[in-house]
Amino acid sequence: MAECALCQQGDPSITVRCWKCQATFHVHRYQLDMAPEGSVVMGDCPGCGVVNCWKKANGQLDYSGPVLDVFVSLGQPIMDLRRKR
């Protein structure tokens, strides 16, 4: 995986897998710590560009898949880690 600015600063990361293309990429602990417990975390796959969605539970990401309307309709907080276009 390519070194990003947070990697260069020594921030630990978690490897995740894209639900669509199965490519692996990483989310940093710094980014994950900003998301409240029980929130939805979104991030772009650097391989295929599709938006991935995870639920943060017990300090970990425990769900991987497309952005689901059910998360939004339940009123859960959302942490958007997608690249700015």
Image (cartoon, rainbow, N blue to C red):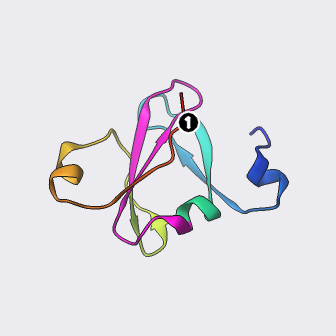
Residue ID for mark 1? 83
User: Is 41 displayed left or right of 8 in the figure?
Assistant: left
Residue range of the region highlighted in magenta in the rendering: 33-54
- Residue positioned most to the top: 48
In the rendered view, tell whether residue 61 sits above or below residue 17: below
Q: Residue at x 55, y 36 (%)?
A: 83
In the rendered view, tell whether residue 32 sits above or below residue 66: below
In the rendered view, tell whether residue 76 sits above or below residue 82: below
Quadrant of the rendering where the N terminus is positioned:
top right
Whether residue 46 is in magenta: the answer is yes
Query: At numbered mark 1, what does the secondary structure look like: helix, strand or loop?
Result: loop
User: Is 46 displayed left or right of 80 in the figure?
Assistant: right
Q: Position of residue 52 (x, y in %)?
A: 42, 40
Q: Nearer the viewer, residue 26 or 6?
A: 6
Q: Quadrant of residue 50?
A: top left
User: Is 33 displayed left or right of 66 in the figure?
Assistant: right
Q: Residue at x 43, y 75 (%)?
A: 58
